[in-house]
Amino acid sequence: MEEPVNNDNVIANQFDTAVPSKISTWTKIKNFLFQEITIELTPKQEATFKAINDFWHQEITGEQVHNFLFQKIQF
């Protein structure tokens, strides 16, 4: 039996070599969107990112919310 033609969008099936598998458009989009990226930050950018991240993930208790909402205001 002849080997299947291997174009850009056809890969050999790992389970049955006689049946080629086509890469669908959705698979191409998914592979593009979910590819692994690496970001390198300068020390200043890293410090800013850490400060913002710490601000958004700080622990807030009900008592702190109550104290903020019901604080005395002077006019």
Image: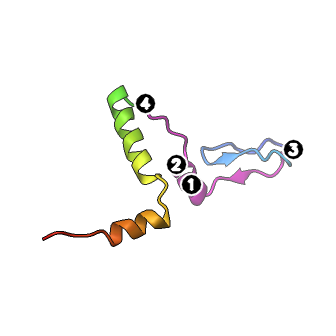
Badge 3 vs badge 1, beta-carbon distance below 8 Å = no
Residue type at mark 1 is: Lys
In the image, 45 versus 37, the foreground residue is 45
Give the numbered dot on residue 32. Answer: 2
Q: Is residue 19 on the magenta stretch?
A: yes
The residues tagged by marks 3 and 1 sit, at their Cα atoms, a distance apart of 34 Å
Label 3 crowding class (10 Å Cα cut-off): few <14, some 14-19, many 20+? few
Q: Are marks 1 and 4 in contact (CB under 8 Å)?
A: no
Amino acid type shown at disc 3 = Met
The mark closer to the camera, 2 or 4, is 4
Say which of 43 and 24 sits in front. 43
Q: What residue is shown at x 48% (from left), y 67% (from top)?
A: 62
The spot of residue 57 in percent (x, y) is: 47, 52
Q: CA distance from mark 3 to mark 2?
A: 35 Å
Magenta highlight range: 17-40
Q: What amino acid is at disc 4?
A: Glu
Residue 52 percent across, percent down from the top left: 37, 46
Q: CA distance from mark 2 to mark 1?
A: 5 Å
10 Å neighbourhood of mark 4: few (<14), some, or many (≥20)? Answer: few
Q: Quadrant of the C terminus?
A: bottom left
Residue 73 position, x and y percent, is 21, 70
**Disc 3 designates what residue?**
1
